Amino acid sequence: MLPTKSQLRPVLLGFNAIMITLLLALALVSYVSLNHIVEDDDYEHLIVGGLTSNLTDARFHVVQVQQFLTDASATGDRDGFDDAKEHYQALQANLDEIQRIDAEFKNDISRTRSLAEQYYQIGQKMADAYITQGREAGNALMKQPDTGFDDRALALAEQLDVLVKDVQQRNQKLVAENMGDILFLRNLIVGMAIGLGVLVLLGGSALYRRVFGILGGEPAQAVTLAHRIAAGDLSQRISGTPGSLLAALEQMQDQLKSVTGNIRSLSREVQDSSEHLSDASQAMQHSVHSQNEATRAMSVTAEEMFQGIEQLSHEVSVVGRQTEEAQNTINECEQVIRTSASDIRSIADYIGNAAEKVHALNRQTDEIASITRTIHEIADQTNLLALNAAIEAARAGETGRGFAVVADEVRSLAGRTGSATVEISSQIDTIRQGMEQVVKVMEQSVEASRRGVEQTDVTSQAIGGIRDNTVHINQHVQGIVVALQQQQAAMGDMTQRIELIATMTGSNQDAVDKTVSASGDLKDHARELGDAVSIFKA
């Protein structure tokens, strides 16, 4: 008969209870000891670290007080008193902090505080003596035995050294206590581990004897049969009484026969299905590969189209800007032409006015010529009259001699007047010819100005037409730019979607590749499963 649970449970529970109790005791002792060590270590870092830090700062402030008072003594600058006072106050703060951290240092701190106060006061007196009384007075206070600045500084430094040694001793004591706790914990753990090992050996031996005392001699045969079943031999004839270990082995062998038979059948079906799945997956893999290549090619084409549209949009934008510049230039040209036409009209008016004035001058010249002809006729008549007078004077003889002289002068004057009028007439004729040429040129200039104004108007109208066409062209270009921007946005969106499709296709390709690989693995596993089950012989 197999041992029942009621027979084995007390033995196993008792052994487990002893083991758990020993382990809990070991854990509790270890926890308490480690907690004590951690607390001591925290105290060491918190207390000793704070004491060491404040003592270091205190030494620094003592040196700084000495430095600033010495500088004030040497330079005569009283600003050093303020700096020395700040460090003295900081020194007092460090001493207060040391006393707060550990009250055992109260007496040492009081002694240090008294020395620091004496040191600071004698230092102030020394610096003041140097400044107000001279070097000899200051040297006397600095070198004075016992109460001088140097001796006070030495006494304060020695007292701080005493505090440092006390802190170091405290630290060494804590370290020694921690090491003792650690050694105790180590020895305790080692001892309990050895005791636990001995108990495990003794308890295991007793448990072994107890269990096999319950089982009797049947387990040896059961072990042999179990080894054969494990080797794959399911054809053994096993007979045992109901409820025994052999009966249980016989039932296990029958169940293994049934299970291995089902596994063989299922492995063959899985192998066949995996072959079909592998073929379908390979075909799908080929299709997905083709789809992936086509998608990537389409993505590259879409990207090239996007870049082409972007470049075309840029070029059209440049054309739009150039069209706007051309429109502005045309507007400026139109304005210049209008200004030129106005100037030409003004010039034509000026030339017309000048021509009228030249005509008036020509008429005045005609009047002058008429007056000159009249003067010439008068001169001719005067010459005839003078000639007649000379003839009459000659007839009169000596009586008319004086009158003859006057007549000769009159005739001579009339002759010169006639010559002058002839010359004036000649000049007037020359002037008239020149005026006629000027008038002709002015009339031609007026006509040319009129034609220029007409051409300017035609040019202005043509430029206005060009301007209107440029405006239309610019509007069309702007429309093209907007359309290209919309195309660019649409192409960008399409490119992103194609990239998404390509990514999804790549993911599908990876999934298909994994499916192909998995189907191959499934086929191999089914074959391996069949091989593994084949070791069992029914």
Image: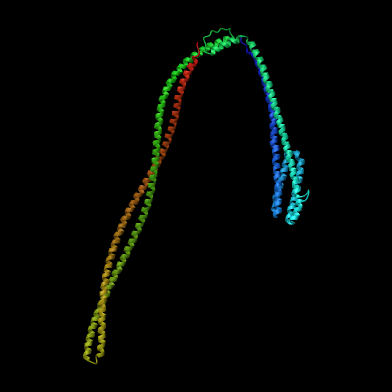
Q: Nearer the viewer, residue 329 or 373?
A: 329
Q: In terms of image quadrants, where is residue 451?
A: bottom left
Q: Nearer the viewer, residue 505 or 119?
A: 119
Q: Residue furthest right?
A: 146
* 180 shown above or below 144: above
Q: Is residue 25 above or below residue 251?
A: below
Q: Position of residue 13 (x, y in %)?
A: 66, 17
Q: Residue at x 72, y 30 (%)?
A: 180
Horizontal relation, residue 78 to residue 408: left or right: right
Left or right of 100 in this view: 392: left
Query: In the image shown, does 235 or 242 lie closer to the viewer?
Result: 235
| Residue 292 shown left or right of residue 393 in the figure | right
Evaluate whether residue 488 shows in this view. Answer: yes
Q: Is residue 21 visible?
A: no
Q: Give the total number of marks visible in the rendering.
A: 0
Q: Quadrant of residue 431?
A: bottom left
Please name whichever residue, 21 or 218, is drawn nearer the observer in this view of the structure: 218
Q: Identify the colour scheme used.
A: rainbow
Query: Percent from the top left, x then y, of residue 39?
Result: 70, 32
Say if 397 sits above or below 66 in the image: below
Vertical relation: 535 (above or below) 398:
above
Horizontal and vertical percent position of residue 376? 25, 79
x and y, in percent, of residue 72 in the image = 70, 53
Q: Pick the quarter of the image with the N terminus.
A: top right
Instruction: Judge from the rendering whether residue 304 lies leftward or rightward of residue 421; answer left or right.
Output: right
Which residue is pictured at 30% across the width and 58% down the height?
454
